[in-house]
Amino acid sequence: MIVGVGGQGTLLASKLLGQLLLDEGFDVKVSELHGMSQRGGSVVTYVKYGEAVHAPVIGEGEADFIISFEKLEAARWVKCLKKGGTIITNTQQIDPMPVTSGACEYPASALDKLSAVGVNIIAFDALSIANEAGSSKAVNLVLMGALAKRLGMSDEKWYAAIERMVKPAFVELNKKAFATSYNL
């Protein structure tokens, strides 16, 4: 699963991942759930692959990985993680509407609570890495680099996919962002 907030690049990340898996010969289903994404709301993308995939949606306890662009989104979707699965999350905080309106407070210890119950979490400041690569908008490729490394996917194949699917003006930036986390 790839989860985040509208405008963070979750959809490009899921399209790149889906295309790479298709290129590897897998049956792939990608399904997107936008909600209030254009207003900063939650965005969820399901990417399922295997020899034969019959349904695109990932249910509770089915996700091998949850890639989270924002730490509260990791906590929101943890119920979908399978036992032994891993969350790769950006430590960035984006306040949801109830927090910005003052109706509630952002839960300060969301990731600590997940760790305390035994969830495998890889949490890092993907935003800083993206900024170092040249743009905060490259967080998606930073997170994909971390996932690709853990899946044993070739960085060269990712570079080729980035060249095919990203606007030419942003190819080198995205490759640099990907490489930085892939090589950590």
Image (spheres, rainbow, N blue to C red):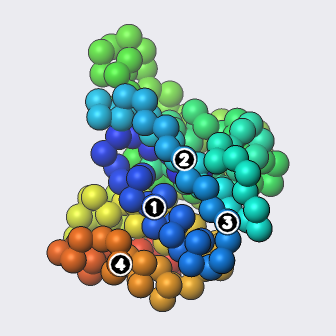
Instruction: Give residue 110's position: percent from left, percent from top.
Output: 57, 35
The alpha-carbon separation of the residues under discs 1 and 3 comes to: 14 Å
Residue at 41% in and 83% down: 159
Secondary structure of the residue carrying tag 4 is helix
Residue at 66% in and 77% down: 25
Q: Amino acid at mark 4?
A: Arg
Numbered label attached to residue 175: none
Are the residues flagged by discs 3 and 2 in contact, CB closer than 8 Å?
no
Are the residues flagged by discs 1 and 2 in contact, CB closer than 8 Å?
no
Which residue position is annotated with label 1?
15
Q: Amino acid at mark 1?
A: Lys
**What crowding class fits label 3: few (fewer than 14 Cα within 10 Å), some (14-19), or many (20 or more)?**
some
User: Of label 1 and label 2, which has the lower sequence position?
Assistant: 1
Which residue position is annotated with label 4?
164
**What crowding class fits label 2: few (fewer than 14 Cα within 10 Å), some (14-19), or many (20 or more)?**
some
Secondary structure of the residue carrying tag 2 is strand
Q: Is residue 177 depicted above or below 140 in this figure?
A: below
Q: Is residue 175 depicted above or below 1 in this figure?
A: below
Asked whether the viewer can see residue 182, the reply is yes
Numbered label attached to residue 27: 3
Q: Amino acid at mark 2?
A: Ser
Which residue occupies the foreground of this view, 44 or 82? 44
User: Of label 1 and label 3, which has the lower sequence position?
Assistant: 1
Residue at 67% in and 66% down: 27
Q: Which numbered disc, 1 or 3, marks the residue closer to the eye?
A: 3
User: Of label 3 and label 4, which has the lower sequence position?
Assistant: 3
Instruction: Give residue 129's position: percent from left, percent from top.
Output: 35, 67
Are the residues flagged by discs 3 and 4 in contact, CB closer than 8 Å?
no
The alpha-carbon separation of the residues under discs 3 and 2 comes to: 14 Å
Numbered label attached to residue 31: 2
